Amino acid sequence: MPNLAVESNGAAIIMASSQDEKRGPELMLDGSERTFWSTTGLYPQEFILSLGTQASLSSVALSTHNVRKIVVEKTENKQPTGFEELFEVELEQADGLQTLEHQTSGVVAKHLRFVIQSGYDDFAAVHKVHVSGDPLK
């Protein structure tokens, strides 16, 4: 299944709760685990990923650092409103990258909201977002 969370497939980060000129939210979609979006300290921190089109999702995967608890929400709406919780995960602390993959089994979404509710340090980072699925016609 293709990665829907890439700019070439129409995906974009349309909102992020913190901005850093060197570590902007667009870096989460570049496919590299060497680059990342960095939060700015207080929790919760969040970002919204627009998939560009409605899609049937098979999985959502993240590579993060210092994230303790994250909630992922979805909406099928054209506008990023009316989100419903898709899943919530508490991650183990790790020396390196934390990896998460959650199977979603055909959930339909146009936008995903990722809410980092707590971290293991003042700052957390998201290195990569990968959303597998098929665009709906």
Image: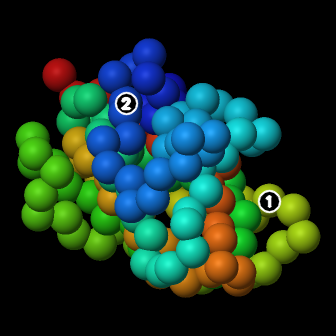
Instruction: Relative to 5, say whether 62 is above or below.
Output: below
The tag on residue 54 is none
The tag on residue 11 is 2
In the image, taking residue 1 as reference, residue 113 lies left or right, namely left
What is the C-alpha distance between the residues marked 2 and 1? Answer: 23 Å
Tell me if I can see residue 97 in this picture. Answer: yes
Name which quarter of the figure residue 64 lies in.
bottom right
Instruction: Relative to 131, say whether 98 is above or below.
Output: below
Q: Which amino acid type is shown beneath numbered disc 2? A: Ala
Name which quarter of the figure residue 71 lies in.
bottom left
Percent across and percent down for residue 118 are 55, 83
For the residue pair 1 and 100, the one nearer the viewer reads as 100
The disc, 2 or 1, on the residue closer to the chain's N-terminal end is: 2
Q: Pointer 2 and pointer 1: residues touching (CB < 8 Å)? A: no
Q: Where does the C terminus fall, quadrant-wise? A: top left
Percent across and percent down for residue 12 are 37, 33
Say what secondary structure mark 1 lies in.
loop
In the image, taking residue 105 as reference, residue 107 lies left or right, namely left
Name which quarter of the figure residue 104 lies in.
bottom left
Instruction: Relative to 66, say whether 59 is above or below.
Output: above
At 23% across and 30% down in the image, what residue appears? 53
The tag on residue 97 is 1
Tell me if I can see residue 130 in this picture. Answer: no
Percent across and percent down for residue 72 are 40, 66
Percent across and percent down for residue 120 are 70, 83
Q: Which amino acid type is shown beneath numbered disc 1? A: Leu
At 29% across and 72% down in the image, what residue appears? 85
